[in-house]
Amino acid sequence: MRSLFVSESDEITIKFTVAEDKDGDIFCGINKEEFVKSLEEGCEFRDYEMVFKKPSFGDSVKLYSSIFNINANDGVNFNPVMARYNKIIALIKRWTLTDDSGKPTEEQIMKLHPFIANTVGIQLENLIGDSI
């Protein structure tokens, strides 16, 4: 039986492919084979990965407190894009998008193309399920 506790070495790896078409438009996909077939010829493809820590109960508590805003006038406010951003920021450990130490900064994450951030963020949500 594996440990009942989440350790720093427990990771989730998301592999993805980024395409650039002849007009310079950027696209991102998780399933490379299907992704390549869905685009027109002449695209340039590159493979990358992001590695996230597996969320613990403590991570869940911190993330939930930052995702939901409760106020007396409007009730509960939930912003799914902010929730996705907070998960990426809180859980990311490293990526292959840079030539530096591999540890992404919040500033670098904010500069990601929206297709990349959303594709990876949705896949992260799919992989961690209801734990956060």
Image (tube, grey):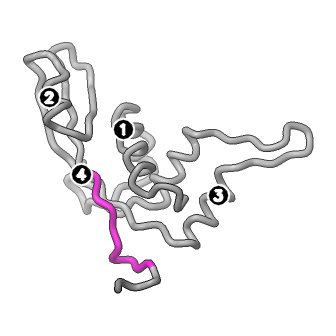
Q: CA distance from mark 4 to mark 2?
A: 17 Å
Write down the residue under mark 4. Answer: 49
Separation of marks 1 and 2 at Cα, in angstroms: 15 Å
Which secondary structure lies at badge 1? helix
Residue identifier under label 3? 64
- Give the mark nearest the N terminus, 1 or 4: 4
Q: Which residue is mark 2?
A: 36
Image check: 3 left or right of 96? right
Horizontal and vertical percent position of residue 67: 65, 50
Dot 4 crowding, Cα within 10 Å, few <14, some 14–19, many 20+: some
**Marks 1 and 4, how far apart in space?**
12 Å
Q: Is residue 8 magenta?
A: yes
Callout 2: SS = helix
Q: Earlier in the sequence, mark 3 or mark 2?
A: 2
Observer-side mark, 3 or 4, equals: 3
Mark 2 packing: few (<14 Cα in 10 Å), some, or many (20+)?
some
Which residue has dot 1 on it? Answer: 119
68 on left or right of 25: right
